[in-house]
Amino acid sequence: MANTPVQVVWFKRDLRTHDHSPLAKACAAGAVLPLYVIEPGLWGEPDSAQRHWDFIAESLGDLCDDLAGLGLPLCVVEGEVTEVLAHVATTVGPIELHSHQETGNAWTFARDRRVADWCREHRVAWHQARQQGVVRGLDQRRGWVAQWEALVEAPLASPSPASPPDGWKDLPSLPPARWRQRTLGVGRESCPGRQPGGRRAGLATWRSFLAGRGERFHRDIGSPERARNAGSRLSPHLAWGTLSLREVVQDLRQARSERRGQDEWGRALAALESRLHWHCHFIQKLESQPDLEHRTLHPALQGLREDPHPERLAAWCEGRTGVPLVDAGMAALRETGWLNFRMRAMLVSFATFGLGLPWREPALHLARLFVDYEPGIHYSQMQMQAGLTGTNALRVYNPLKQAEERDPQGRFVMRWLPALARLPEAWRQRPWALPAAERAELGFVPGRDYPLPVHDFEAEARRWKRTIHEARQTPEARRDSDVLLERLSSRRGTRRPAPPPSPQLSLFSEPDQETP
Ligand SMILES: Cc1cc2nc3c(=O)[nH]c(=O)nc-3n(C[C@H](O)[C@H](O)[C@H](O)COP(=O)(O)OP(=O)(O)OC[C@H]3O[C@@H](n4cnc5c(N)ncnc54)[C@H](O)[C@@H]3O)c2cc1C
């Protein structure tokens, strides 16, 4: 293999060796250099957080161990990717590059363009494989479901043992002690109660779900308290790739067939499988319309909410809006980096409808708090919950109604806001309404012991619901809605010509793209 280029495997959001087709392909081709690049530009972006890095660092630990089992080292290098690749090529000789496709934020999109240009200029082949059910360069959704099936049903990719190239030790690889302790600076706090990173932790979480936790999935995922145990809790592992979507779907289908006839398990596993579909369905939206990280999905709704209301924003971010379910959700998120879907949706609904905030700052704040931050799901869901897609039914979650339905005894609220624990059940979700006699008896003063509501959120929400509803009704807005529906929904039929292709096409229509 003297003249075979060195096979560089660039790990991004795929921190595993199991079912890793770029690694498998590289191992079959020659000497292999596994590479993780710490990119200062990426970590300077406003959606990055220490908790993301801490999860990654733990995952890199497991990745090192698993690569060692294949006879390979992991080089962790800090720098701009094209400069790192240039350094690698001068150190170990000609290279080929392997990675998974990434549907990330605008920064990673621009970086991938630079890498593609660099590869073209230096005649380096860049092989990219799919790991999500996302289809690059798709201009409408016909056939999407079949492509998702083909991806998840394909055999798992198993890398075989390989050797690193001569000279790899001359690369400026950081020792684990250096990257484990990396800190990102002020305002990017770590998260004491977060899920641990790494493949071992991911497998343990998944196995415990299949072994028992998951049986009440479909019943309990709406409850902020019970979902912590009943949810699969796979989200950070899927987001950072310590588990592959394909291995999860295949295990799940195996479990479904073994438990046929067990009604509860049948319902639970079917509900989980739909969510694994949604996972890719939402990432596809960002892939097809990358500017939805910055602009509203529906053009008629761009710029509707413009007043930044700094005080309301600060109260929401800091969990002191005076509405217990909202503040408890924010406290739980700060501490653990996770919330169930319903609570996430309610927080966004409250910020954008109840407080009238523009959606972008809340989106960034939540991105920094979610350990499982996945740009494609995140921005698509943000826009949906903020009522900005123009195609979905307008759904506004009132925290008082949610509290009645999802936390009727106030257990979740008491856990995260201990100041409210001494209030009788009836007042835990509305402490501002505590009658005078109870205030005196309990020594509880609304406004002193817990904030008063920062705003009349019910009136504000009614106003925004009306405004958005009206903005969607103009003939032009309706026409735009039809075009969006055609492009972004996974229906099979077609009603009108496809809109122009997204800018992602021009970058990723390279001939050496793979699909498994
Ligand atoms: C405003 C908002 C932002 C969100 N941001 C993210 C994010 O950054 N990363 C993220 O992984 N999820 C996000 N979600 C979706 C969802 O809330 C989380 O995936 C879920 O709570 C994670 O918990 P779990 O792993 O126990 O999920 P489960 O309910 O067990 O679902 C299994 C997997 O399916 C996927 N999934 C579940 N629900 C959805 C959904 N509604 N849309 C798309 N995929 C879904 C996730 O990958 C999840 O891990 C967001 C939801 C909202 C409303």
Image: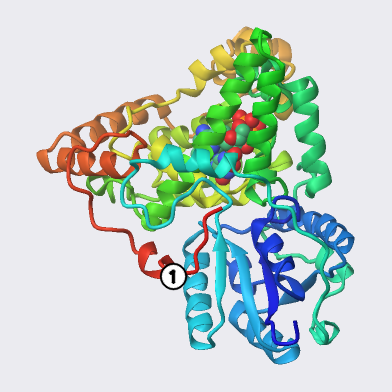
Q: How is the image coloured?
A: rainbow
Is the residue at mark 1 in contact range of ligand 1, meaning its CB lies under 8 Å from it? no
Circle 1 residue: 510
Residue 101 lies, with reference to residue 363, above or below; the image says: below
Q: Residues within 10 Å of mark 1 (few under 14, many from 20)?
A: some
Q: Nearer the viewer, residue 297 or 302?
A: 297
Residue 195 lies, with reference to residue 507, above or below; the image says: above
Q: Which residue in the rendered view is the most extreme toward the bottom?
A: 90
Q: Nearer the viewer, residue 438 or 44?
A: 44
Residue 431 lies, with reference to residue 340, above or below; the image says: above
Residue 254 picture quarter: top right
Q: Position of residue 41 (x, y in %)?
A: 59, 73
In the picture, measured across the screen, residue 215 lies left or right of residue 132, that is right
Q: Secondary structure at mark 1?
A: loop
Q: Position of residue 304 (x, y in %)?
A: 28, 46
Residue 234 lies, with reference to residue 399, above or below; the image says: below
Amino acid type, callout 1: Glu
| Residue 393 in sight | yes
